[in-house]
Image (tube, helix red, strand yellow):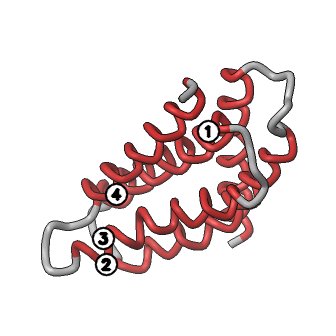
Amino acid sequence: MNSEFNFALLAVLVGFFVAAFLAPWDSYFLGNFLYYWGSQLAVVGVSLIFKPRPIVLAGIATSLVIYLGAFGLWVHSLPARDAMVWLYYFLSLPGALGGAVVSTFVFPHKSSATASVAGLSTIAIVWAGAIMFLWLY
C-alpha cells in the first residue's frame, strides 16, 4: 500500500471518530451517527465513481471531517440549540459533492501534481463548494 492510500484510509477513520464524538450518546446515537458519517461516506462513495487518486480521496474526506467538526463546534456553542440547524449541514453537502467531483477532474489519477498540492487543493475546493452552496440558501 502506498502512503496516499494510507492518508485516505486515515481521513475516513478520523471521520468515523468525529461522527461518533458528535452524536449524542443516547437512544438516538445510531441515527445521528449514521447521519453524520453516512453523509461523508456518500460524498466519498460518489467520488469513487470517477476513480480519483487516493490523495484526492484523502483531501475530500479530510475536508468533510473538518467541516463536520467545525459545524458541530458551532452548533454546540449556540446558547439555544435548534434541531433544524443541522439541516444547514445537510443542505451544504451537494456543494461539497460538487467540489469533490471537480477535484477528481482537476487532479486525475495520472496528474503531475505532488500529493501535498493535490490534497490541500482538494480540501480547499470541497470547502468552497460546500460554502458556496450554503451561501445560496
The residue lying at 30 percent from left, 70 percent from top is 81
Quadrant including the N terminus? top right
Secondary structure under tag 3 reads loop
Reading the image, the residue beneath label 2 is 31
Reading the image, the residue beneath label 1 is 59
Secondary structure under tag 2 reads helix
Residue type (three-letter) at the residue carrying disc 1: Gly
Secondary structure under tag 1 reads helix
Residue type (three-letter) at the residue carrying disc 3: Arg
Reading the image, the residue beneath label 3 is 81
Upstream in sequence: badge 3 or badge 1 = 1
Residue 14 shown left or right of residue 60 in the figure: left
Reading the image, the residue beneath label 4 is 19
Disc number lying in front (3 or 1): 1
Disc number lying in front (2 or 3): 2
Residue type (three-letter) at the residue carrying disc 4: Ala
The image position of residue 106, as x and y in percent, is 86, 40
Upstream in sequence: badge 1 or badge 4 = 4
Judge the density around disc 1: few (<14), some (14-19), many (≥20) Cα neighbours within 10 Å: many
The image position of residue 46, as x and y in percent, is 68, 64
The residue lying at 60 percent from left, 56 percent from top is 44
Disc number lying in front (3 or 4): 4
The residue lying at 73 percent from left, 23 percent from top is 117
Pick the front one: 90 or 17 = 17
Residue type (three-letter) at the residue carrying disc 2: Gly
**Callout 3–callout 1 Cβ contact below 8 Å:** no
Give the Cα separation between the discs numbered 3 and 4.
Answer: 18 Å
